[in-house]
Each structure stands twice: as C-alpha cells, then as structure tokens.
Amino acid sequence: MDDVEQGWPDEGRTAPVGRPRRSRQALLDAAGEVFVSSGVDAPVREIAAQAGVGVGTIYRHFPTRSELVVEVYRHQVEACAEAGPRLLAQSDTPEAALRAWVRIFVELLVTKHGLATVMREGGDESDALHAYFVDRLVPVCGALLEAAVEREPDGPVVEAYGVLRGIGNLCIGAGGDPRYDAEALVQLLISGVLAGAVR
C-alpha cells in the first residue's frame, strides 16, 4: 500500500475533541471494530467517532492509513496470542482452553479477514507481518495442543503449524457465505486431532 492513502490526509482534519489522550490501544480497538463493519477503507472520521476522539488524534497516532491497518493487524494478533495462556489458566480443562482459543483464532481469520487480505497485498511488509503472525501464534497453539493431547512417546506428533494451516484452509472464503460454518468444521478438525493423538 502507498504511504499516503487516497482520502486519508483530506478527510476533514479537525482539532481534537473528546478525549485526545485516549490510549493507543483504545484507538486500535475502535479501528478494528470499524474495519470489521465498514472495511479497511472506512473514513477516518468513522474511526474517530467510534473511539470518541477527534480526527486529529487519529492522525497524530497514525499519519497514514497503511500504518493504522498494520497496527490494527498486529493488535489483533497480539490479542489472540495473549488469550492462549489466559485460557489455559482459567479453563476447566486444557481441551476446553484449546477449543476456546481456536474460536478466537477463527474469528481473527474470518471476521477480520479484510485485514489479512490487505496485508497479503503489501509486498515485503506483508511478508514480515506473516512471519510475525506465524512466530506469535504457532507457539501459542503448540502449548495448548501439548497441554490438551495425551501422547505416548512413539505416538503421532501433532504439529501446531499444520493445525493452524488446516484451520486457515477451512476458513478460506467463509466470510462471504452465510451457510458455511467454518467454526463448526474447525471444531471437528480439533476433535480429529485430539482423537488421533490420544492413545
């Protein structure tokens, strides 16, 4: 994506109103919600309204749309990664934690698929973000699988990367077809992984 996106610099910059010192995380949360409902090309004033700040506050934190989209994507990945250990500590069983985390991962892939699409079109930057995505989420999935799977020493090895790739393949195109329940199919995949690994 170009550094200066069409419409970003000229979308009615105004003096900050509301809470100009609103945290960066709150701005990313608001932008993420707007991107889900209106797409990544949503007007900056819509993001500002969702965040309860002035348009100028958005520009101060994120001078270009590209920067905002990248940071929202990273923010979503971080939230997914951080959910893994929390769910493992709070859930009744490791399997329940794994299944709950998989739901969050599916939401990241399906509901927020527009972010990933933009990132895939970004050249070197998208390659770096994909590597970041893999580096952050594969270990989280691996820890959850290790906790949930009881395996004999010579039993099959459950590879977190392969499981996440399988989930990703089941989620392709799910956002555009209301009859396709990717999450249900993914849970069946997890059942198969657990059944095949347990001896």
Image (tube, helix red, strand yellow):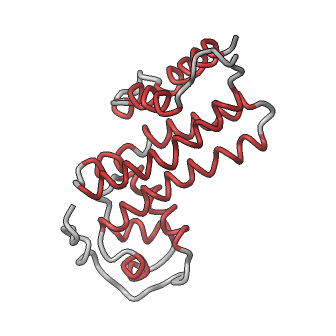
Instruction: Place residue 19 in its image quadrant.
Output: bottom right
Quarter of the picture containing the C terminus is top right
Q: Can you say whether 103 is above or below 113 in the image?
A: above
| Residue at x-position 42% and y-position 30% | 165
Front-most of 14 and 91?
91
- Residue at position x 66%, y 31% from top? 146
Residue lying at the far right in this picture: please name it. Answer: 92
Q: Whole-percent x and y of residue 72?
A: 43, 60
Q: As rendered, which of 76 and 48 lies closer to the eye?
A: 76
Q: Is residue 194 left or right of residue 160?
A: right
Q: Quadrant of the N terminus?
A: bottom left
| Residue at image coords 77%, 37% | 91
- Tell me where residue 190 sits by quadrant: top right
Nearer to me, 153 or 169:
153
x then y, percent, for residue 65: 30, 67
Does residue 131 sit above or below 28 in this rendering?
A: above
Q: How many marks?
A: 0
Which quadrant of the structure image shows residue 26? bottom right
User: Which residue ends up furthest to the bottom in the rendered image?
Assistant: 15
Q: Is residue 26 above or below residue 189?
A: below
128 displayed left or right of 143? left
Position in image of residue 60 (x %, y %): 40, 82
- Horizontally, is 92 left or right of 77 in the view? right
Residue lying furthest front: 154
Residue depicted at 57% across the width and 14% down the height: 192
Compared across the picture, whether 149 is left or right of 128 comes to right
x, y percent for residue 98: 65, 32
